[in-house]
Amino acid sequence: MIRSAIVMSAVLALTASASAADLGWNGGGAPATSTMFSSTSVADWNGFYAGVSGGYLWGNTSVSPAITNTNNNSSGWTAGGQLGFNMDMGGFVVGGEADLQWANLAYNEPLAGGAGTFESKLDLFGTARARAGGTFGQVMPYVTLGAAFGRGTTQTISNNTTTSQNGTHFGWTAGVGIEAKATDNLSVKAEYLYVDLGNASYNLPAAGSREIGQRFSVIRAGVNYAF
């Protein structure tokens, strides 16, 4: 997970430089070399915004006591929306963002003795995060950190009977991103988050009592509209 974060940070930093230099988001006047960090923002980031986003999840679902393995690879998709507020301090932007995402992060494995199938998945998750970034022309790389929660479902399928239970997870998240102004009101972004939702208890007749942990990475793209 940490390696993924480092790689994504490097990719986003390079993307920021390329965006400012090659995509004409430097105001169209001075050469790209003049778009270095300054005390005055070329674009105005102040105010509230809302948008939509979607992407891919991959990570690890832990099961204790284990059915076969304690740690299990899981993956899936995510889609949802976000609300936020930026305060432009002149070349440096701080703010906050909250999002809610539907998800299909899941894994499954056979129950002992061929008695059926055990499945655990994450149905939705949300975050409430602080953001801080520097402006380079109309491009803003940023870092983000905050709290996270999720709703999981664990179920067993045995003798054509499905038994399931929902659980709520709480944890934290951290990541990096880049956002670029396409117009005064419209911006696009790419973001990487690592999310640790900790463990929640589930108790199913065919599987007994299990502690399920959800820890995963998110890579997603989105569009924001500033009011």
Image: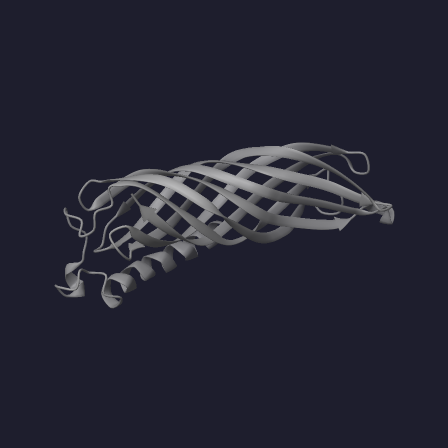
**In the rendering, at what x and y percent does residue 74 appear?**
62, 51
Horizontal and vertical percent for residue 155? 73, 41
- Scheme of image coloration: one colour
**Residue 100 appears in view:** yes
**On the rendered structure, is 164 left or right of 46?**
right
Residue at coordinates 59% horizontally, 37% vertically from top-left? 151
Residue that sits furthest to the bottom in the current view: 22
- Taking the image as shown, residue 78 lies to the left or right of residue 87, namely right
Name the residue located 22 percent from the left edge and 54 percent from the top edge.
136
Number of disc labels: 0
Whether 168 is drawn above or below 39: the answer is above
Answer yes or no: is residue 3 visible.
no
Note whether 84 is above or below 36 in the view shown: above
Which residue sits furthest left?
30
Image quadrant for the C terminus?
A: top left
Image quadrant where residue 165 sits = top right
- Image coordinates of residue 211 in percent, x first then y, are 67, 35
Q: Residue furthest front?
A: 227
x then y, percent, for residue 12: 36, 57
Q: Residue at x 68, y 44 (%)?
A: 120
Residue at image point 28% right, 62% down = 19
Q: Nearer the viewer, residue 34 or 220?
A: 220
